[in-house]
Amino acid sequence: MLSSLIFLLSLIFVTCTQADSDYHERLLLRPLPQSALLASFNFRSNESSASFEHRNFRYFPRSLGQTLQHAHTKELHLRFSLGRWDAESWGARPWDGTREGGTGVELWAWVDASSDEEAFARWLTLTNALSGLFCASLNFIDSTKTIRPVISFRPEGHHTNSSLLNLHLLHGTLPHEVVCTENLTPFLKLLPCKGKAGISSLLDGHKLFDASWQTMSIDVRPVCGDGSECVLEMEQTVDMVLDIERSKRPRDNPIPRPVPTEELSCDTSKPYNSEDSCYPLDKDAEPSWSLAEVFGRPLKGACPLTDASGYESETVCINVPTEREVQVNTSGTYAEERHEDGLLRCYKLPTGVDFDLILPEQVPTANLALEEPPLYAARSINGHGQERGSVQAVITNPSTTSAIQFVYLESLPWFMKPYLHTLRASISTSPSSNPIEETYYRPAVDRHRGTHLELLLSIPPASTITLTYDFEKAILRYTEYPPDANRGFDVAPAVIRLLPSNSSPNTKNVYLRTTSLLLPLPTPDFSMPYNVIILTSTVMALGFGHIFNLLVRRFVGVDEVENWNTGGLKGMLKSRIERLRARFLGKGKKDE
Amino acid sequence: MSPKADTDASPSSNSNTADGITSGKVIDAVTVKKEPPPESKEAIWTRRLVILSFWAVVILIGLPVWWKTTAIYRADLPLQVMTDWADGKTCRPVFPLRIAVEAPALPSQDAQHLLRTTQHALDDLNEFSAHHLRLLLAESSTTVNTSQDILPITNYKDTGLHGSTNDEDIALSIRLIPGESGTTPRSELQPYSPTLEVYYTPNQIPPSSSTSSPLATFIANELQKVFAEEQATLAYLLSTSSTAHNSKIKSLSPETAASLERQSTRAFKYAPTYHLTFSLFTPSATPSAWEVESALHEYVSPLLESLFSISNFTVDTQVQLYATFSPSIRQPEYDPERKAWTLRKEDLSGFINAAEWPLSPSIGVGPTVNFVLYVPDQNQSPLLVKENGGNSWLIPQWGGVLILNPSTQLNAGIPTALSKDALRPAMLTFSNQLFSLLGLPQSPASLPLRLSTLKRVRAASLLFSASSTLGALARLTKALPSISIPDTVAKSVDQTIVHLHQACNELREGRFHSALEHARVAEAEAEKAFFERSMVGQVYFPDEHKVAVYLPLLGPVAVPLLMAALKELKNLSRSRKKGSA
């Protein structure tokens, strides 16, 4: 349901590409079960290829444009993500998963270059420049974190066949990267209205990074219409799932407080129900919320750069049942339109004045049907010990009718060395058949390259594929361990791309990603090198001292030693004490 | 104690001696004290040899190996030569300018004579020996050619790009034109070609007998006037950049020095490429478009083409909406007299909101020159500078700002797009600002002359800057013995010195364009040598760390070696003494 909605929206977007304005934005709100709220922000701006080539930037940000030109990048996809999409309760992913990335930072780009080496050099330029632009550690994407996927990604933009020959796809991930406010600020600065007007004025780092799941994406691609001039399209999206109760907490008082006893609704049928014990009842009513409450700041009217009329001018849409009451609070003039049999209400915002949507508490009569995701995927590390482990990915096709062909892409760090001969894929319904149709494998090279594994699989209806392989854990060099080595090492999420089926080849790509894994590696005691130095030095010095003494000492009989009787430790001490006493007493006498 | 001592009741000193006697007696009675057998000479010598060989191994093998393995590679640098360059001992830049005199109407003898007298007059006027004007008589054939060629800009461009060296070496041509009308002599400087036209009446030609004439003095004075600013700039440059030249140059008046200093602090450092960024900022959503491409094409591109012989330029533009003032400056105030909003002069430095406005430098080598066109909000328009009512200012070594107040028709509001005509004043201001940011002199009026002046000034300043970088590198090498110096640094230093020599020679020969080229390479190489990355790493590995790692081994090994050596030396000296006694 949701993804078809978004698909419809994007279809309308595509048909409206030739509209007057070169800047579009839209916010889609959709309440999810368990008082969650999905907010999808989408911003698109176009710049004609000619003015991009001449470096006359209007809606396209100059900083990013220069970076792309400098690195000869023709198409760019950058993702910042946090949290996990709970497919069981929330259903299919927004944008069919095409606008989301794995936990941390994910970047892939088509770079124009004549050779692989040149492409990689330009890729490094790109990552370094983006790193500065977005305040992220993208510059840590080096050769060990870069792969060149074969079938998992296809260019989204229009490239001529001749230019495609020189395009190199490079893909890098940083699963360890923590996405935070410092990444949002430059993201907002790329927008023409800069978070000062339009739907971007709702974006606040405190709420965005407090969400259960959030992903920010930037996509740059050339788009060529039929016969018209090509444009460079930049699309920025922010998707987040907010917990309504949690987001409604005021910022200056964020600690949750217990509900006062009077406001508790108790199950009075329980035998123990009394004044001091209560079995709380679930509220059947949907909680009340408003934009200003949930996002922590008001929506400051429309961004004047968007279209003044038509579908594109309706920049806030909410997807609720027709019976749901939605109040509008604004002093300006707004317009409301209903689409999709009233399931989608879109609002044209007033310019220059605040706008707020208020949804009062209401007992729902009918819930929106959640669209079932086409595939469920989960991945985990099994095994014990410091030496070996195994990875297990469980992929389920919930559909009872259609088989699905998909690509499974793994980008593993070099210190996690898979044994390809242990790769097994079994289907729950027919254990004997092998679902793996094609395998692309590029083994790791220590400290230079990570493993790149791409599998083409097909899954019959209503069945589960269990994919397993064993791996060996490498022992790192002393200096290669990060400061928090005992936390473990992050392994990038697997990317799953659903291939369009033969019956409907025009359907869009669907992507989903597993969560990232935490791989514990054998970690040394970091004071070890100094202990080793000191211990070996001591042993060597002992040996040396003995040999040296044997060589240079003179050996005589015990009774031949001078002063033997008075000698020894006892004698020496005695004589010392005598001498000291004599000196002391002598001094004392002098004093007298 | 023996019972005898008790009964004796003698003083303690006595009892001691008595004790000693008794015990001596006892020993005598029981055994004779055993002496170790005397050591044979061979045994002593073997022991000494053993100790010696250990020490020999330590000193002859251990120390050199240790030294070799922990030594830092330091390539040989010509430190003395580098310091000499920095002190200005090696090169004294001179600027001999060739000035061609075309006198088609004069017989060559007269022309020669005029030339000589003018040269005399010039030499008398000139106080700055490094900057020397030399007059040449142009060949009549070339005269015809150049006079036909003289057209605005296009001609200049041609000579700049592929004109013969002969043409390029001529800094200025003087054309003597006989004229009857108007006051004579009078001169006219061509704005788009390096030509000074001098009108004279034939009776002003000096007779061959006289040594001076009003015409010669006039020409000399005019030339001096044309090159006055260049001389002052070069003199200022020489005086600030090195101590060695100070004595030889004429002293500048404090006002000139101050204005030259202001000019030089304003200007960017020389770079082969400059990135120009034109930005439209507005605090609201309008205007969101401007016809910047055609405006740039019309007003800025011709200038950039004429500057091409000195540097390359890249141009980019951007539009930024919702650009608010930085909170650190005071908001504009309304001035009812002027009917305008005013900004205080002291707030102009904080006008650019560096934290919010995306004015990051362009990617790629070379500095970025920013030009900001600010269109104020409608309710704060017009916006002016309080003190002088101006609307544009220059930020040294950064760029220029212009506040564009759209022509106010109160009901019309601010247009959503700025037309080319509306941008005209802004572009002209930006062009002027670009000239001062590049360090182009204010005078003379001829653009090619100003450019060639800039070329000479840039060549000289690059020469000095490369020399001082060499000096700094030499000082650094001497000051930090623990940093490594890779071969690439030595190579770069050699390259720098070679190119500095060439630049200096070219200056002396008067070929300023190739002098600039060589100085440019020298500067780049010097910077490369100075900022070599691998030189820095070793500094942070101090000797204390090495000791901490070695000590557990070296300590216990060194102690027995030292003790044995000391003991043996003691024995040796004792036996020597015994032998001598």
Image (tube, coloured by chain):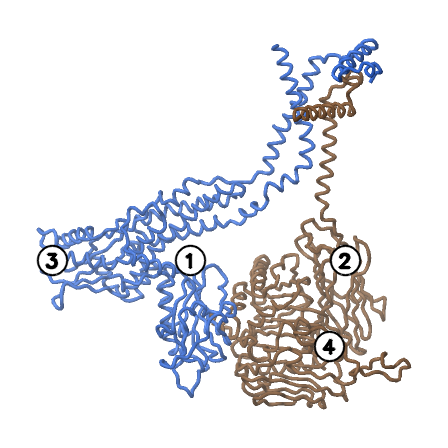
Q: CA distance from mark 3 to mark 2?
A: 100 Å
Residue at the spot of label 4: A92
Q: CA distance from mark 1 to mark 4?
A: 55 Å
Residue at the spot of label 1: B271
Identify the element where label 4 is drawn.
Answer: loop
Chain for numbered disc 1: B
- Which residue shows up at 68% across the image and 26% down it? A588
The chain letter corresponding to blue is B
- Which residue shows up at 66% across the image and 74% down it? A251
Amino acid tagged 1: Ala
Chain for numbered disc 2: A
**Circle 2 or circle 4, nearest the eye:** 4
- Above or below B96: residue B569: above
Q: CA distance from mark 2 to mark 1?
A: 55 Å
**Circle 2 or circle 1, nearest the eye:** 1
Q: CA distance from mark 3 to mark 4?
A: 98 Å
**Circle 3 or circle 2, nearest the eye:** 3
In the figure, the shade used to draw chain A is brown
- In terms of image quadrants, where is residue A154? bottom right
The label number, if any, that marks residue A420 in the structure image: 2
